[in-house]
Image: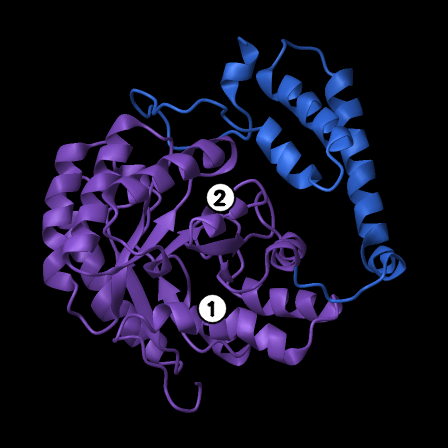
Amino acid sequence: MLCSGMQRRQLLDLYYLEARSKLLDLAAFLDRVERAPGEADFRWDAFHAALARMQASPGGRAAGVLDALSDPTTEPIPVATTKAACGAWPGNAVS
Amino acid sequence: MVSRTTDDYRAMVVAGCAAVCEPAFWAGFDRSSAAGFYDYFGQLTEHEPRRAAKFGLPHFCWLCINPKEAEDVQLAQEVIALIPQFLSRPNVLGIGEIGLNKNSRNELKVLELQVDLAARQDQLVLVHTPHLEDKLKGTRLILDVLRADGRIPPGRCLIDHVEEHTVKLVLDRGFWGGMTLYPESKCTAARAVDMIEQYGGERLWMNSACDWGVSVPLAVPYAAQELRRRGHDAGMIDRLIYGNPKRFLSQCAKFRLPEAAS
């Protein structure tokens, strides 16, 4: 641990308004997608799974969210058909 | 930096950057032949050092075929065969950024070939870990390859783009971890400082993403500002943003900084 010695209140002073803004952006994003018609999407399911992990992983929320959005398999895929990552594991859609 | 204008070199110098280290990476499109890589390696070892030198910025680079172009194993083998003739050039630090992109079998084979090249040529290694949903699996596969080969001492290998779910995997195995800073989509300065505070600053460093996407060459100086905001003292900040990279890179005898900057 390499603590700077900052107290909780100091960190809130530093980051609270920024985090509040991001929280509102997130809430608005969820509302926006819910208002729109369309098919189910694995990214939406993965996003909700990540939100649940965030609530359930005190002390390791960032890692929990990243884990929830990660490919959990261990074997190499047969062939790369794209170069880009999309931010969620498509396998969630069929699991 | 092949993806950047000279304005960025000037801005880095003004912000106090002592050197730039540019990995061989994707051009934004697939090169059609090994000859394209030959020219690229010339650009990294001849043209870019001259361009950076106009602003007083020492330029170093890493050479490889990047994971995004590693699906074609035959092309990769042709490119790998070109690399040794460039390794003795004065600004080449080692092999990188090798690694995985989508975690495919061919990418893995090409990774093994480049680890072998680095081991045979006694080179430092810079490793790219995949992005987003592919990072965790890819980091594990990469660590397995390095462990199975066994010839690259972990202290001579930097595993780049670590995030909260991979940083411990990397550090626990004795490797250096790199946190690549992006203004959006990946690791921010605040999160990088979180990881430093949780895992210590012994074998971690931060680097600025300077690719074709939205990225900021001054991300490291901005991270220094974040460290100051978080109450870290000047000595600690200097160790994290300057001392650590210098300590790792100085394992290559060619990494030398001008006296005024060291």
For residue A65, above or below residue B182: above
Which residue was labeled with disc 1? B8
**Residue pictured at 81% horizontal, 64% vertical:** A6
- The purple-tinted chain is B
Determine the residue located farthest toward the right in the rendered image: A9
- The amino acid type of the residue labelled 1 equals Asp
The disc label shown at residue B169, or none: 2
**Residue pictured at 51% horizontal, 31% vertical:** B133
Quadrant of res B61:
bottom left
User: Quadrant where the C terminus of chain B lies?
Assistant: bottom left
Between B4 and B248, the residue placed more toward the observer is B248
User: Residue B55: where, in percent of width, then height?
Assistant: 40, 80
User: Residue B239: where, in percent of width, then height?
Assistant: 54, 74
- The amino acid type of the residue labelled 2 equals Leu
- Chain under numbered label 2: B
Between B155 and B222, the residue placed more toward the observer is B155
Decide if residue A23 is in sight here.
yes
User: Quadrant where the N terminus of chain B lies?
Assistant: bottom left
